[in-house]
Amino acid sequence: MKKLSVIIPIYNTPKLLLEHCIESVQINVCKIGDEVEVLLINDGSTEQHIDPLLKETEASDSHFHYIYKQKSGVSDTRNLGIDKAQGEYIIFVDADDYLEPDAFSYMLESMKKHQADLVVFGYCINENSHVAEERIEKWISGSSRLEVLHSLIADSLGLWYEKGVNLNSPWAKIYKRDTIIRNQIRFSPKLVLHQDSIFNLWFVSSVESFYIDNRIVYHYVVHENSAVHKFSNRLFSVAINLIPMLEKHVADNYPDNKDFYDAIGKRAYFYVRLIKEDYFTHPQNPKSFWELKSEMDAFLSNPIISKWLKKMKLRGAEDTLDFKNRLLLKMHLYWIFLITQRRKKKKLGVTN
């Protein structure tokens, strides 16, 4: 059995970024040799440079294995990688990112040293290597583990980002493959976004502890084709599909934990605010006020969303603006906010 399987899902990654990613992986592979396999999984890319590059990489290095599949999304692609992997440990790498030259050897040594099911490492955005000033090396267990689970449910991981750690993502981590297989942990194909945090929620729920070492091993690359820059209405379906998953997970595993149910409510409110910012008031949204209001009313009236908004407490507001947002939501007068935003845009000369 190999010690390490590296899973790289690929879909229409820009050529230079993909080449940089593969080069950084090759540098890492050279340092650990036969202990590693790299699965290059092409999720039905249509860009012409993808297939030749991956075939050439496979032909030139026996550690690399090229797999082509029909397009079905990143969750299915990563799941296929899990099924095909032969390693004792698994690392996920996104095809537009890159690694420090000694990332694999350091991550593998850390996993062996701590005998953990999961070790989480540090990352930085692009070339920036000054994300966190505080060096962290510690086990997360007991109440600390419960705090992480709460944060994963609520999607409130800001403090960890400040420490140079991304607990939502599958990258910059090394997982024990047997734990994934034994607990049947997979990425959900129902989710077109935020499937990563649910995978990690399920994984952390299945172990008693994990280790954090925020030394930087991974570079997350933000570019014009990054998912974070894409305007879409995908968050509607994500919210409606993800929240029931959280409800079931908490009911099955932590039925008496009131804080976890409160965290689901925070997640529902988080999605409403995110949809407001990334869709309803997005400058690229061409729809009229009445079209937006209709979509908003339908979303807020969805039984899943409506249930959690009814439970939302006004006294939980962070500030005056947040209080007004919550009040308008409860009164189904959220369209007032849309009018306010549109007027602000007109004053600034921004039009949809």
Image (cartoon, grey):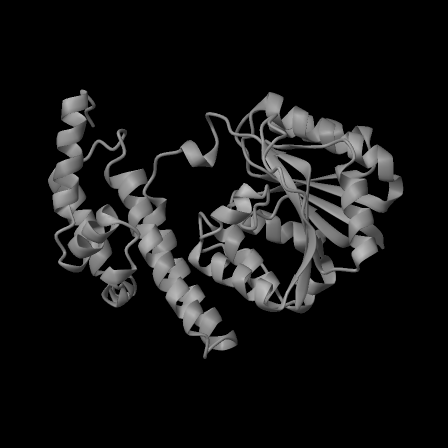
Which image quadrant is residue 220 in? top right
**Residue shown at 71%/52% (left/top)?**
84
**Residue shown at 48%/57% (left/top)?**
151
> x, y percentage for residue 172?
65, 43
> x, y percentage for residue 122?
65, 42
**Residue 49 against residue 83 in the figure, above or below:** above
Return the residue nearer the eye: 291 or 170: 170
Return the residue nearer the eye: 239 or 85: 239
**Residue shown at 48%/32% (left/top)?**
226
Return the residue nearer the eye: 78 or 235: 235
> Is 94 left or right of 194, judged from the image as shown?
right
> x, y percentage for residue 118?
69, 56
Does residue 86 show up? Answer: no
> x, y percentage for residue 123?
62, 38
The quarter of the image holding the N terminus is bottom right
> Is 31 left or right of 39, judged from the image as shown?
right
**Residue 191 against residue 8 in the figure, above or below:** below
